[in-house]
Image (spheres, rainbow, N blue to C red):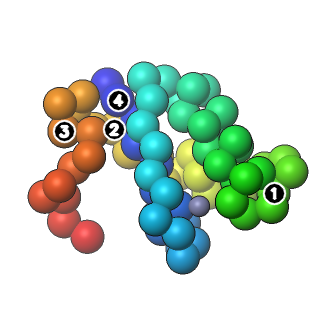
Amino acid sequence: MTKQFACKDIGLQCGFEATAESEDELMAKVAEHAKAAHNMQQIDEATAAKVKAAIKDVPAAESAAPQAPQ
Ligand SMILES: [Zn+2]
């Protein structure tokens, strides 16, 4: 199952979305983005918990979820 995360899912005004094959891989991508785009040198525990809660399982072929309801 593909994992998906979008910054807007945790209330950030940001169009970033990432998908990965595992939560660990996704968290690594999110950490990299957070550092580059949000000046977050490290994701703190509270933010990590928010990110993990916002991670969605998506079918691999629909990782962009074009018709997902808001
Ligand atoms: Zn972002």
Helix, strand or loop under label 2? strand
Q: Where is residue 56 drawn, in percent x and y?
A: 38, 45
* Real-space Cα separation, disc 4 to disc 3, in angstroms: 9 Å
Please identify the quadrant where the C terminus is shown: bottom left
Q: Contact, CB < 8 Å: mark 4 with mark 2?
A: yes
- Give the residue pinned by disc 4: 2
Q: Quadrant of ligand 1?
A: bottom right
Distance (Cα) linking label 4 and label 2: 6 Å
Cβ(mark 4) to ligand 1 < 8 Å?
no
In whole angstroms, how far apart are the C-alphas of marks 1 and 2? 25 Å
Amino acid type of the residue tagged 1 in the rendering: Met
Which residue in the protein does label 3 denote? Answer: 62
Report the mark closest to the observer, 4 or 1: 1
Q: Is residue 49 visible?
A: no
Residue 11 left/right relative to 2: right
Q: Quadrant of residue 24?
A: top right
Which numbered tag is attached to residue 24?
none
User: Residues at badges 2 and 3 in contact (C-beta under 8 Å)?
Assistant: no
Give the residue pinned by disc 1. Answer: 40
Question: Going by the picture, which residue comes out furthest to the right?
Answer: 41
**Residue labelled 3 has its Cβ within 8 Å of some atom of ligand 1:** no
Q: Position of residue 20 (x, y in %)?
A: 45, 29
